[in-house]
Image: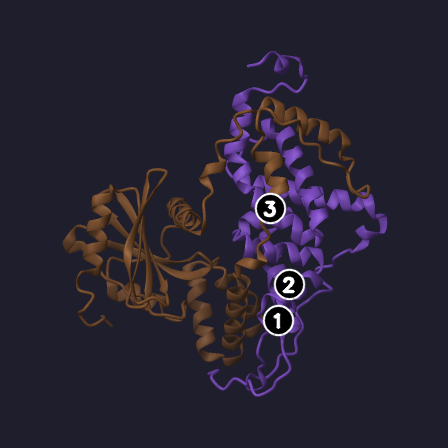
Chain colours: A brown, B purple
Amino acid sequence: MMCNDARLLLHAYLDDELDAAQSVAITRHMQGCATCAADYADYAQLRKAMAQSSLYRHAPDELRKQWKAPERATSPVIAKPRRGLVGLAMAAGFVGALLLVAPMWVYMQHQRGGDTSAMVGDAVSSHIRSMQQQHLMDVVSTDQHTVKPWFEGKLDFSPRVKDLAGEGFPLIGGRLDALDGHSVAALVYKRRLHVINLYQWPSTSTTSAQDIAQWHGYTVIRWASRNMQYVAVSDVNEDDLRQFVLAFENDAVSPPMR
Amino acid sequence: MPADFQSTPFRASADRSVNFEVRVLPYLDAAYNLARWLARDDADAQDVAQEALLRAFRYFDSFHGTDARVWLLAIVRNTFYSLRSKTSPDGMHESFDDDVHTITDEQPSPEARMVLATDVISLQRALEKLPHPLREVIVLRELEECSYKEIASITGQKIGTVMSRLARARERLKTELTQQPSEARRHDVQ
């Protein structure tokens, strides 16, 4: 591969949009080309920087209220046209009417909580997204010695990878994902026909108690151990997921495998 | 349902509203985020988002796809460009020629690599400086985490175009964010 191709493809590689053959080609090229490798590192840094949550502009309350919380008694919200940007007058009437006919628009509101539940929600939606076709795994292997090296160079940390087939949770693969503004390693396990996603990324807290949450039928367990933050998500029942976490943490004291 | 509902010409079924609420409104933040980065102004962004949601509600019956987020974001984008062409007739002439904006070829040698400023203020400035066609793809990719395919369908571009625009957007950001070399040189590039 030539640098010219690589300079375009490394973005697609960063975005996880290349197939396996292309990924191999670009990794190989970067091993031999300091310039492209350094470029890649810059872009990875740029991506990380762009994940800073303050860059994301959340809808202002005003807008949210107009669409989400019409109390039955309130008069229709009129959006006023500004600086001739929109011919909104008609539209405003429309909103008013809309709000009148939609008294049931309230119930979504309570789903939004603080950071914690947002995090849980993120984890679940990531889990659900991962179940869509072709997104579940980037590296398909039941061998932890294949899965772990696969992450090398793709993350700035080395994830802990364990096969738990003996405990009834066979490892089936892994992929890169993003959660809560971090690049994370996602390990994919199975429990009978169910899929368990285990996310991990470095954290400052050495250990923390498990935090269990339920979200639309999914169970989410979060904990930290040995400077890693973990989140396990699945639709298996809570006991099974607890057991999985227990199994994963079980020999935490044994030397990390290479 | 109370009687006054019957009289409004806009009487929609409650199902439809609930449906809209469940399927589209979860992407209110996404809609606003895109509108805000395109418009670069709070009030304008609110107008764009508002108008886009109205359009979305109006055309909700014709939405048969599976991905409401992509559908809504495409509406936000179209709304922005159509409102912009109305308010500033000359504002539309920011034409974008994919061939002109080719990737520049000069690359600093690895030894002379500089450090990127990655604080929020610098990033925001650099992003706002990008031309719209580049800004929208990078915002959709990095902030909205859309796949190339999703970006292609939101912006009505080919996937290849999305890929090359993303590359260009990042190159520009990098140039924009590159700090003067000081003590912070990199020696660790192999």
Amino acid at the residue labelled 2: Gln
Q: Are marks 3 and 1 in contact (CB under 8 Å)?
A: no
- Which residue, given by chain and number where applicable, does mark 2 sit on? B124
Q: In x, y percent, where is residue B177?
A: 63, 72
In the image, which is nearer the foreground, mark 1 or mark 2? 2
Q: Residue at x 44, y 77 (%)?
A: A31
Counting labels gives 3
Observer able to see residue B153: no
Mark on residue B174?
A: 1
Q: In x, y percent, where is residue A182?
A: 44, 61
Element type at marker 2?
Answer: helix
Distance from disc 3 to disc 2, alpha carbons, whole Å, reads 17 Å
Amino acid at the residue labelled 1: Lys
Circle 1 residues within 10 Å: few <14, some 14–19, many ≥20: many
Q: In x, y percent, where is residue A75?
A: 66, 26
Q: In x, y percent, where is residue B104?
A: 67, 72
- Which residue, given by chain and number where applicable, does mark 3 sit on? A59
Circle 2 residues within 10 Å: few <14, some 14–19, many ≥20: some
> What subunit carries mark 2?
B
Element type at marker 3?
Answer: loop
Observer able to see residue B121: yes
Amino acid at the residue labelled 3: Ala
Q: Tell which residue pokes out farthest to the right in this image.
A: B90
Residue in front for this viewpoint, A64 or A90: A64
> What subunit carries mark 1?
B
In the image, which is nearer the foreground, mark 3 or mark 1? 3
Q: Residue at x 50, y 80 (%)?
A: A34
Above-or-below relation of A213 to B4:
below
Q: Earlier in the sequence, mark 1 or mark 2?
A: 2
Element type at marker 1?
Answer: helix
Residue in front for this viewpoint, B177 or B104: B177
